[in-house]
Amino acid sequence: MLPQLHRQPWMDSDIETFRDQVRRYIAAEMAPHLPAWREQGYVPRETWRPFGEMGFMLPEMPEAYGGTGASIAYQLVVQDELTRAEMPNNVQVNSIAAHYIMDYGTEEQKQRWLPKLSSGEMLLGIAMTEPGCGTDLKAIATRARRDGDHYVIDGAKTFITNGYTCNLLIVVARTGEAGSRGLSLIVVETENLPGFRVGRLLDKIGLHASDTAELFFDGVRVPVDQVLGASKGLVSSS
Ligand SMILES: Cc1cc2nc3c(=O)[nH]c(=O)nc-3n(C[C@H](O)[C@H](O)[C@H](O)COP(=O)(O)OP(=O)(O)OC[C@H]3O[C@@H](n4cnc5c(N)ncnc54)[C@H](O)[C@@H]3O)c2cc1C
């Protein structure tokens, strides 16, 4: 029996109705699978399609991008209910990373990816950490070299949440000088992508159903229009 929630100051009756829908959905459709998901170390990506169709993936996105234009409180409620049911943090990372696209993407990029992330057709991860670089992100060594209309990515990432199951990834890669100013964010569609490889599904002391993986990039070619933040001067080149 789950404990009764105390009423947060930002709750209203609409959010409570939404919370109730999310809670009942998780209990009926997801909780029975949790032991198997923990055992295998990941939640199958197909799980997020009906979750998205229910409007639970990115409710806070504008309607034009597949959301309902709801306040961020609705995303918090989804996170709260997933956590209470001991579900992994896949949706949390998906949502955090989707806001990079929302905030730094061009209109074309938003139209291209956000509706699919809202519907659960796509699942997003963000790849910063590397075998030789964690907290100190300015040491990132994964490089994206410009070659005509493409970037060519070489390097390795580790500890990436959703790394095993996602089909969209924001890769933090070095496109310019050493240090933090030489880094850019490149959106990579990973399905059937030559040179991209998912390594080990990493074991952890907790979050057993959350896939945390190694990723390898060996000459991965990504069109330059998939870099985020170009119009805001966030793309670095040397
Ligand atoms: C379950 C899980 C999921 C993750 N998901 C992702 C993901 O989706 N994407 C991603 O990119 N990464 C992910 N990570 C990686 C995570 O971001 C890194 O583990 C984190 O950045 C710390 O890096 P590190 O493990 O290399 O530790 P280090 O950077 O080696 O730090 C080790 C310790 O030293 C301390 N420390 C480091 N530098 C200093 C300093 N200058 N001064 C004082 N103290 C310092 C740190 O606070 C920490 O306590 C995940 C990790 C885990 C465990």
Image (tube, rainbow, N blue to C red):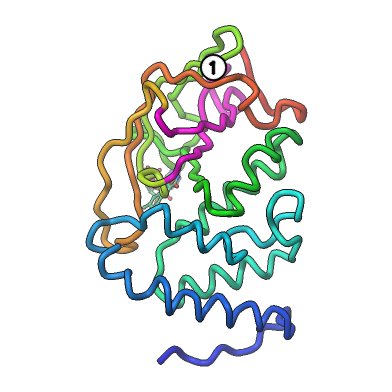
Magenta residues span: 166-192
Q: Quadrant where the N terminus lies?
A: bottom left
Q: Quick one: quadrant of the C terminus?
A: top right
Q: Is residue 115 above or below residue 31?
A: above
Residue drawn at x 59%, y 27% as measured from the top left: 184
Q: Quadrant of residue 225?
A: top right
Q: Residue at x 60, y 73 (%)?
A: 77
Residue 187 belongs to magenta span: yes
Q: In this image, 128 relative to 203: left or right? A: right
Image height of 191 relative to 40, above or below: above
Rendered residue at 74%/65% (across/down): 70
Q: Is residue 148 magenta?
A: no
Decide which of 23, 153 is in the foreground and name it: 23
At label 1, counting other C-alpha atoms closer than 10 Å, the crowd grade (few under 14, some 14-19, many 20 or more) is many
Question: Image height check: is 91 above or below 101?
Answer: below
Res 176 quadrant in image: top right
Q: Residue under label 1, please give it.
A: 151
**Label 1 residue near ligand 1, CB within 8 Å:** no
Amino acid type at image mark 1: Tyr
